[in-house]
Amino acid sequence: MTQTEHPLLTDMLLETEEKIHNEDYTSAAVDLRKIGEHMAETLLREASLWDEARTKKNGRKAERPQFGNAVYLLLEHNLVPRDVYNDVFQKLREYGNRAAHTAEPVKEYEIRFAFEKTKEYADIFIEKHPYAAYFGITVPDTEETCAVQPGSSGKADGIPKSVPAACEPLGYTLHSDVIAAIDGRPIPSYNIAGETYIPVKALPPYGFVLSAIPGMKCWEISRLDRPVPDEYAPHFVPQKGTKPSGTPAFPYYLSGFSTRAGTHEIPNYAINGAICIHMDDFAACFSAELVWDAETSTINMKTDR
């Protein structure tokens, strides 16, 4: 399976800092705008505002939203604090525009201020959105999938918990003491008839990249080209269940999305507001070994890392 190369946001910030040190303020302003666009698009997707952000005045949808419109929606929907809106996104939009489209140079004090504020916010952003710590990674908008129990309210993982009555559950997951892990690190999991399913959105801290295929409801999963830095490592701690093993837990549904690694389709269901993939098929796509530890009731997916 091929690996995907995506630079870390922190690496991009270091490169931008070097350009500022070399007094290349125009190029630094362009790079900072790209970082701002990535963070804004992540926030809009998670808030199910992606379609609104990329809809033009004539009603047609662009492939990506204009940065100015994205920044406006961040404020309108309170997705970032006012000071972050002013000091980060507004500045990156203004300075990026000047650097790319006008003869007015970006001044040293302007770009240094914008860089420091962006760096401060990037630390908070990465902590809250670990899968987006890698620049250029996008996720599909899951807004329309029939993914959770009909009649409930609220949202989980960007999927509305209000779906048509015709969207009936296929069955129920089972309470289980089995722990799923990737390279020894536990990961959330669900049990369907003795088979283990893991949430797609939980994968990035374990060294996998999630990408959206334009125009399709599809997760594309690939391997990161290097080990995940310790600061982005997963922190999931499995909790011992209070219900007897084998008793019904969550309903599961057809997700309306496909999940794939290269040309390989990975079976999935929608469970508890998340799209979950079959762990055995997922491991097979990456030539990983599944090892069962009877003493700890752990199924561990061992990669080549």
Image: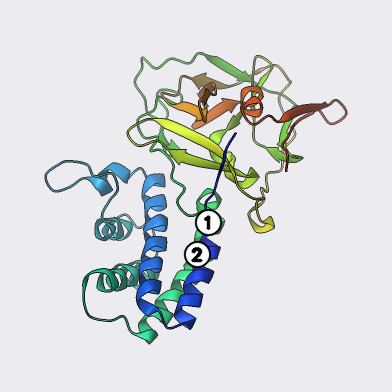
Q: Is residue 202 left or right of residue 219?
A: right
Q: Position of residue 42 (x, y in %)?
A: 41, 51
In this view of the protein, which residue sits in the foreground, 142 or 162?
142
Q: Position of residue 192 (x, y in %)?
A: 62, 18
Amino acid on which disc 2 is placed:
Met
* Marking on residue 89: none
Q: Secondary structure at mark 2?
A: helix
* Marking on residue 7: 1
Amino acid on which disc 1 is placed:
Pro
Above-or-below relation of 101 to 43: below
Query: Residue at left 46%, top 76%?
Result: 19
Above-or-below relation of 94 to 305: below
Residue 187 occupies which quadrant of the picture?
top right
Q: Is residue 272 visible?
A: no
* Marking on residue 12: 2
State the separation of the CA atoms marked 1 and 2: 7 Å
Q: Position of residue 266 (x, y in %)?
A: 54, 24
In this view of the protein, which residue sits in the foreground, 36 or 287?
287
Q: Are marks 1 and 2 in contact (CB under 8 Å)?
A: yes
In this view of the protein, which residue sits in the foreground, 44 or 81?
44
Query: Residue at left 43%, top 26%?
Result: 257
Residue 28 occupies which quadrant of the picture?
bottom left
Name of the residue lying farthest toward the left:
58
Q: Secondary structure at mark 1?
A: loop
